[in-house]
Image (spheres, helix red, strand yellow):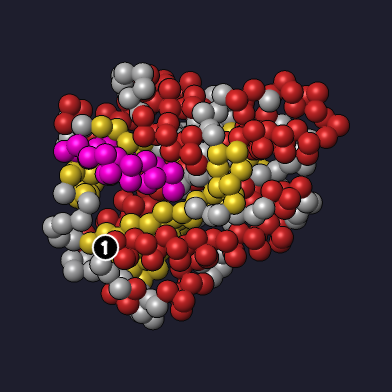
Amino acid sequence: MPPTIITQEEAKALARGLFGARANHFEKLAPVFDNAGIAKRHIVRPVDWYRGDHGWKARNDVYLEAAEALYIEAAERALERAGVRPDEVDGLVTVSTTGIATPSLEARVAGRMGFRNDVERVPLFGLGCAGGVSGLATAARLAAGAPGKTILFVTVELCSTSIRLDKLSKANIVATALFGDGAAAAVVREGQGGVASVEGGGEILWPDTLGIMGWDVEDPGLGVIFDRAIPPFVEDNMDRAVEQILGRLGVERDEIGRFTCHPGGAKVVAALEQSLHLDEGSLDHERAVLKDFGNMSAPTVLFVLERLLEAGMPERTLLLALGPGFTTSGLSLARA
């Protein structure tokens, strides 16, 4: 996580001040800060930066600087825990959607990290919140297809650099109340050991749902698409999507010891419990991560997985995340 922390009360006060003359409209939407289930978040710049007027270039410059630093921190931690040197990594999968990096992030940090010059690179863009699961699944497929090779998966999302305070809309206020910044990484390779074994994954894409979640490309930056229909859509559709993913994997529903979900927001977590027929409060790690870090987009589900591993992973868990498309991504993990 980046070092700057903003509490939810501070974020609410900041948003109230920055929306200025439109405060009366803001007050109608302000309860979203109180109902988000978030206590604090990490952001990549001091609070005063967000008071400024930043265009595309300024925002992306911040994204590049901070994303490179977080990539290195997350990658080094994962490699150290796995007992792998950077020059032993054969492939790099990078997921990020909150900024533009060409060359991509892993290329920009390769020299500082000490990666070999023949390392294979797979940068993935546009996956949004689903990227934590889809990216890990991609890394697992690469590792399975090349026995003996080591794949490093890193996801970095800096949602705060894209929060738009120039346009008062419900989506922008929700984004201001919900999103934080963070990074996560995992080492994937064929063989025994590690923290979990990847059994396989799947994705479900619903047609004609482009307007539910994503980014609009606007001046002076990305504009969030965050439809109020997300929680009811999840409640109505997630159970069938999970059944389809499990059917593809040949796994029965009662073989899943726990669902490990991306906590998109308090209402989304509640909708997941409802759709998946879970007891209220079952997704406790999800709520705890949301409270401590907010929605960091793609990395968030891996923060939840880390807490599950620390608490004691069941024999099998299904990672789940929702993202633009509208899509859900699932990945079955067995206890090592």
* SS at circle 1: helix
Picture layout, residue 112 above or below residue 175 = below
Crowding at mark 1 (Cα within 10 Å: few <14, some 14-19, many 20+): some
Q: Dot 1 corresponds to which residue?
A: 82
Boundaries of the magenta span: 299-319
In this view, the residue in front, 207 or 193, is: 193
* In the image, residue 177 above or below residue 160: above
Image coords of residue 316 (percent x, y): 19, 38
Q: Is residue 302 visible?
A: yes
Say which quarter of the image contains residue 152: bottom left
**Closer to the camera, 280 or 334?**
280
Q: Does the magenta-highlighted stretch encompass residue 302?
A: yes
Image check: 123 left or right of 169?
Answer: left
Q: Is residue 228 magenta?
A: no
| Residue at left offset 75%, top offset 55% | 55
Tell me the kind of residue under disc 1: Ala
Q: Residue at x 37, y 62 (%)?
A: 77
**Residue 172 found in image quarter:** top right
- Relative vertical location of residue 137 with respect to residue 328 in this rendering, above or below: below
- Image-based side of 121 in relation to 32, left or right: left
